Amino acid sequence: QVQLVESGGGLVQVGGSLRLSCAASGRAITTYTMGWFRQAPGKEREFVAGISPSGLMRDYKDTVKGRFTISRDNAKNTVYLQMNSLKPEDTAVYFCASRGYWSGTLRRSTEYEYWGQGTQVTVSS
C-alpha cells in the first residue's frame, strides 16, 4: 500500500557525509511512523533512527547520536537521514521503513509494515 524508495547512498571516505532520502508513494505519510534500519554483511538488521508522525519524537541508535539526524518533509512525502562524521562501522545497506500506527516506540523492526529496497552506504578508511 505504501512504496518506499531510498536514494543517496554511495561511497564516502571516513569523516564524510551523506544524505539519504526515502520517497514514499501510494499514501501520504503524515500519520506514519518512519524509521531507518541498516544491515551489514553477515549481521542482523539493526535500528538506526526513527521519527514519530508529528516529528516531535525522534530516537537514535546510541552509536549514531550526534552524528545522524532523521527528519521528515510531509509535503514531499519524504523522510531523510543526514549522516555526518561517517565511520567504517556505518557501512551497510540502509533501509527505510514505515508503519501506519503509533505504538509508543520507534525501535522494533517487527512493528514496521513497509520497507524499501535499500541503498548501499560504504565508508572507506
Image (tube, rainbow, N blue to C red):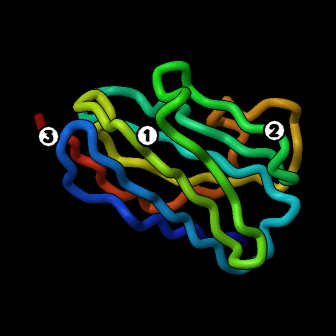
Position above or below: 76 against 37: below
Q: Residue at x 43, y 45 (%)?
A: 83
> In the displayed structure, does residue 2 sit left or right of residue 11?
right
Nearest to N terminus: mark 2 or mark 3: 2
**Amino acid bearing label 3:** Ser
Quadrant in which residue 36 is drawn: top right
* For the residues bearing labels 1 and 2, Cβ distance under 8 angstroms: no
Position above or below: 82 against 103: below
Residue at the disc numbered 3: 124
Measuring from the top left, give residue 4's x and y in whole percent: 57, 67
Please state the total of marks drawn on the protein image.
3
Residue at the disc numbered 1: 38
* SS state under label 2: loop
Please state, as top left, top right, bottom left or bottom right, where the C terminus lies in the image: top left
Residue at the disc numbered 2: 57
> In the displayed structure, does residue 4 sit left or right of residue 27?
left
* SS state under label 3: strand
